[in-house]
Image (spheres, rainbow, N blue to C red):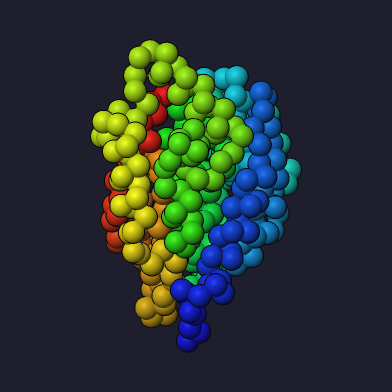
Amino acid sequence: MKKFDYNSTNNPLIDICKRYLAACDAIELSDAVKTLSLDPILETVPLVLKKPGLVYEIMTPSTLIGMGGECTDYARPEDAPPFAEIADNLDPFRHPYLPEPYLPLWKSLDWTFTPEGMWEWILVHDLWHNLPLFWHANYSQVDYVLNKEDYIEILPNIAFYLTPTGRPKKWYKEDIERWAKHERKAGYHPFGRTGYKTKQDMFTAIEMARTFDKDFAPKAVQIDEKTIDVTFCVWNAWTGLKQICYRMERSKRLGIKMTRTVDNLLIKYNCGICF
């Protein structure tokens, strides 16, 4: 069985994730709903396999509609129009219901049952968290913590207060700045909801967090021919740092059965922003 040094700079799961995130970051929101090809992102996860006869797309929300929104990823037959052309009365907060013949990604892709393949499957499964979000939907923003450097960069301080997830994006920064200004104008202390009474208390907590010793590198271990465990760390600015493990198992009914066997909150944190 192939073994990896997951703590080394040659960790293949880290390389896969970085390429995937770079492709996600290239997506931008606009005032109008747009349909974009999903192929540039799928090309970064080659062990997740497209099916012939299907077109893979992303529908981005309009930043002028509703109080927030997220992208919708889906597949359609080649002879069907893009979903945005037939969708009416979309709920801007949630993936819309996909009527036939439109398919969610988990029903329209095949996989490779290897450690790297299951890591790529998890990235695609959680794709919408890593595509652009706006306004209230930003609560769902998730960042992968791949090493100690990522963790140190994410730790909140004044420079990162307005972009607390550590992977700043223009659309995210503008939303945070607007609502942080609104909070201050209303007389709220921006750090108050984090549980720290003063900025100095916050800085003290940050310095303590810097000493946190954890192996952040993602790992995928093949238990047997039917089971693979994938463990990784994620950061959310309203929750904190979590370690997650999915047990990936072959399933006759589902194809791949994902069971979340570990969900450890390693560091509790809330950036204090309330939309």
Q: Tell me if residue 18 comes above or below residue 24 in the rendering.
A: below
Image spot of residue 259 (x, y percent): 34, 60
Image spot of residue 162 (x, y percent): 49, 33
Asked if residue 57 shows in the view, the reply is: no
Q: Quadrant of residue 253?
A: bottom left
**In front: 145, or 204?**
204
Looking at this view, name the residue that lies furthest to the top. Answer: 186
Q: Residue at x 47, y 19 (%)?
A: 181
Q: Residue at x 27, y 35 (%)?
A: 196
Looking at this view, name the residue that lies furthest to the right. Answer: 79
Looking at this view, name the residue that lies furthest to the front. Answer: 200
The quadrant the C terminus occupies is top left
Q: Quadrant of residue 25?
A: top right
Q: Say whether residue 222 is left or right of residue 130.
A: left
Q: Tell me if residue 144 comes above or below residue 223 in the rendering.
A: above
Asked if residue 268 shows in the view, the reply is: yes
**In front: 101, or 169?**
169
Q: Residue at x 63, y 52 (%)?
A: 22
Image spot of residue 56 (x, y percent): 66, 48
Q: How many marks on residues?
A: 0
Image spot of residue 195 (x, y percent): 26, 34
Q: Residue at x 44, y 61 (%)?
A: 148
Q: Say whether residue 90 is left or right of residue 225.
A: right
